[in-house]
Image (cartoon, rainbow, N blue to C red):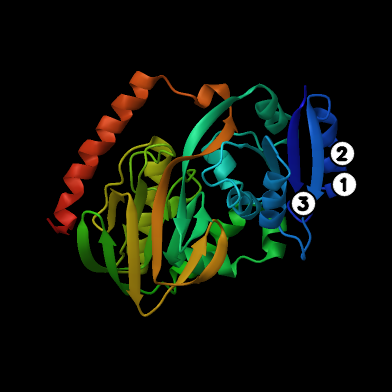
């Protein structure tokens, strides 16, 4: 018996012809699934469609759109056993990249048809679903500067171009941070709290590797003193992303936490999974192993290798305790 599968399709995503892309997706999946198709509209957004699909007994929900659409759909899947399939058609497709899901329809459909199901972490930011990251300060300004015309013309490079333009005007701000480990106060130009992030999310790349199933958030603080210092710190973060090594720069700090509260003076804009959501303060809480996603079989690691990676990350986290005045 075919599984009940609901496809939530955002026709406004991407640069291709939406009708042609939807037809392609359906032709690849309909022979295997009992497929119901739902298109997002300004009046009926992805989160509402996902909740309706859950109420109608969906066994699998497939989402086709950008990171914002994917994030909206997951609001209906918290504490659910429903598996999520992703067919990326957005500008950055950062969550798909983080999971090595192909950015073409044929490849993404193949992952849904033949891939593995993996339990991943997700998070809540001010009670809103967070798959990727929350960026405070510099990154939020860069995202806000990036308009639809730039996205269509340059794709993911549009964010990088906007970020370069922001470098000359970056501002530092005071930060108060609270986690389960303690409290700290500092100043910075950017703070990124990541659940998952590909190499293209440069300001999240303080750690040696961001894992989407370790039950922890990765927090990177960038505190440059000058424009040249900001460029040097960005270069080091990019090197960290490419080499999967810990960022080594005097003005880049990193630590991990299960949950975090951040307030700033003055209030700073916040971007959540690629969309500007408001201003600080924010509270972010990791929800371990809360989301099941179709991923390529190659992404399901050997348990012993995963244990070794987690042991390495724990050692690095211990080294960062000097940041904190811990509360016992």
- Looking at the picture, how far across and down is residue 169, in whole percent? 44, 74
Residue under the image location 79 percent in, 60 percent down:
41
Name the mark on residue 19. Answer: 1
Which circle marks residue 207 in the picture?
none
Mark 1 surroundings: few (<14), some (14-19) or many (≥20) residues within 10 A = few
Which of 161/87 is in front? 87
Q: Is residue 23 left or right of residue 227?
A: right
Which of label 3 and label 1 is nearer to you? 1
**Observer-nearest of 210 and 212:** 212
Instruction: Give the SS element for disc 3.
Output: loop
Distance in Å between CA atoms under marks 3 and 1: 12 Å
Image location (x, y in percent) of residue 266? 36, 80
Q: Let me know if residue 89 appears in the view.
A: no
Q: Nearer the viewer, residue 185 or 226?
A: 185
Q: Residue at x 49, y 33 (%)?
A: 119
**Of labels 2 and 3, the one closer to you:** 2
Q: Are marks 2 and 3 in contact (CB under 8 Å)?
A: no
Residue 15's disc number: 3
Q: Is residue 268 above or below residue 58?
A: below
Q: Are marks 3 and 1 in contact (CB under 8 Å)?
A: no
Residue 231 appearing in the image? yes
Please name the residue that numbered disc 2 is placed on.
Answer: 23
For the residues bearing labels 2 and 1, Cβ distance under 8 angstroms: yes
How packed is label 2: few (under 14 Cα within 10 Å), some, or many (20 or more)?
A: few
**Left or right: 18 in relation to 70:** right
Which quadrant: the C terminus? bottom left
Q: Position of residue 202 (x, y in %)?
A: 45, 51
Q: Quadrant of residue 116?
A: top right
**SS category of the residue bearing label 2:** helix
Lower sequence index among marks 2 and 3: 3
Residue located at (54% from left, 68% from top): 277
């Amino acid at each position: 018996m075919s599984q009940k599968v609901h496809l939530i399709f955002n026709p406004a995503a991407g640069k291709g012809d939406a009708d042609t892309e939807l037809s392609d997706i359906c032709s690849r999946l309909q022979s295997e699934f009992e497929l119901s198709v739902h298109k997002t509209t300004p009046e009926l957004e992805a989160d509402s469609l996902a909740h309706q699909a859950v109420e109608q007994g969906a066994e699998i929900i497939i989402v086709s759109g950008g990171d914002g659409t994917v994030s909206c759909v997951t609001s209906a899947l918290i504490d659910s056993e429903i598996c999520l399939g992703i067919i990326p058609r957005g500008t950055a497709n950062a969550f798909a990249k983080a999971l090595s899901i192909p950015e073409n329809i044929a490849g993404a459909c193949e992952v849904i048809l033949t891939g593995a199901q993996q339990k991943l972490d997700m998070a809540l930011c001010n009670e809103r679903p967070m798959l990727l990251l929350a960026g405070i300060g510099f990154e939020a300004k860069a995202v806000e500067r990036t308009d639809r015309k730039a996205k269509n013309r340059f794709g993911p490079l549009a964010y990088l171009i906007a970020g370069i333009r922001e470098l000359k005007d970056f501002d530092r701000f005071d930060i108060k941070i609270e986690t389960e480990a303690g409290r700290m106060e500092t100043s910075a130009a950017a703070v990124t709290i990541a659940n998952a992030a590909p190499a293209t999310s440069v300001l999240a790349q303080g750690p040696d590797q961001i894992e989407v199933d370790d039950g922890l958030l990765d927090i990177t603080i960038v505190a440059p003193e000058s424009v040249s210092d900001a460029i040097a710190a960005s270069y080091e973060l990019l090197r960290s992303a490419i080499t999967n090594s810990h960022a080594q720069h005097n003005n880049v700090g990193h630590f991990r936490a299960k949950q975090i509260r951040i307030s700033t003076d003055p209030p700073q804009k916040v971007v959540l999974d690629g969309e500007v959501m408001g201003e600080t303060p924010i509270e972010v809480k990791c929800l371990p192993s809360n989301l099941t996603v179709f991923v390529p079989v190659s992404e399901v690691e050997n348990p012993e290798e995963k244990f070794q990676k987690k042991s390495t990350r724990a050692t690095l986290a211990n080294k960062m305790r000097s940041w904190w005045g811990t509360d016992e």
